[in-house]
Image: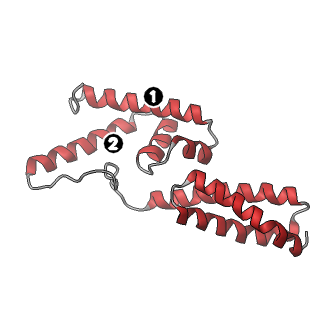
């Protein structure tokens, strides 16, 4: 296809890539990064594309894969599985508190390890990456209702393991 066609379709394709990324991330900055990378990769592939419909399909595929790549890079960053920007950090003024927090983190990690592999993956996306079920569905290709059901099962399983271990009352 001609580069003039790219200039004509680029605004639509960029909007489409941005919409996909916004469905995946809550951050506008990450969405813009995904859209930009999508457009760069689409530009490189443009001469080999037979039709505008193929261009849109490729843009959607690139955007989805780029969302997953960005998410994976975020996962490689060191972080604590129990801390997030929404949690209140307890002062570690007391050795007992620090020990209890450490034991709870270990128990939560161990409980997570008892989940099925597919549930572990979804649970990490939900709990550690703070992704919504619809974002997880978009990233994995699993139906959003199935994602919600698997997360519910994982949550119940972790709760039961922690309850049986005496880490929570209930």
Q: In percent of the image, x 65 and y 65: which residue is there?
A: 35
The correct choice, above or below, for 80 with respect to 126 in the image is: below
Tell which tag, 1 or 2, sits nearer the viewer.
1
User: Front-most of 129 and 21?
Assistant: 21
Helix, strand or loop status at disc 2: helix
Q: Residue 44, located in which quarter of the rendered image? A: bottom right
Could you tell me residue 50's position as x and y percent? 91, 61
The residue at 27%/39% (across/down) is 107
Q: Relative to residue 50, is residue 148 drawn left or right?
A: left
How many discs mark residues in the rendered view? 2
Distance Cα–Cα, label 1 vs label 2? 16 Å
Q: Is residue 48 left or right of residue 92?
A: right
Assess disc 2: are there few (<14), some (14-19) or many (≥20) residues with their C-alpha within 10 Å of its C-alpha: some
Closer to the chain start, of discs 1 and 2, is 2
Residue 64 % position (x, y): 66, 54
**Judging from the image, what secondary structure is the residue with disc 1 in?**
helix
Q: Position of residue 148 (x, y in %)?
A: 52, 33
Q: Residue at x 41, y 49 (%)?
A: 128
Instruction: Give the residue pinned by disc 2.
Output: 109
Note whether 49 is above or below 164 in the view shown: below
Q: Residues within 10 Å of mark 1 (few under 14, many from 20)?
A: some
Q: Which quadrant is home to the N terminus?
A: bottom right
């Amino acid at each position: 296809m001609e580069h003039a066609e790219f200039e004509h379709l680029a605004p639509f394709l960029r909007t489409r890539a941005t919409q996909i990324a916004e469905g995946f991330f809550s951050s506008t900055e990450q969405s813009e990064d995904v859209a930009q990378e999508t457009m760069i990769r689409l530009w490189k592939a443009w001469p080999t594309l037979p039709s505008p419909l193929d261009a849109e399909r490729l843009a959607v595929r690139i955007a989805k894969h780029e969302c997953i790549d960005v998410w994976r890079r975020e996962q490689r960053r060191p972080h604590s599985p129990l801390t997030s920007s929404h949690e209140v950090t307890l002062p570690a003024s007391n050795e007992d508190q620090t020990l209890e927090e450490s034991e709870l983190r270990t128990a939560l990690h161990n409980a997570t390890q008892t989940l099925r592999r597919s549930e572990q993956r979804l649970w990490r996306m939900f709990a550690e990456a703070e992704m919504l079920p619809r974002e997880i569905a978009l990233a994995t290709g699993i139906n959003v209702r199935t994602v919600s059901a698997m997360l519910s099962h994982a949550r119940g399983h972790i709760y039961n393991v922690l309850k049986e271990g005496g880490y929570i009352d209930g």
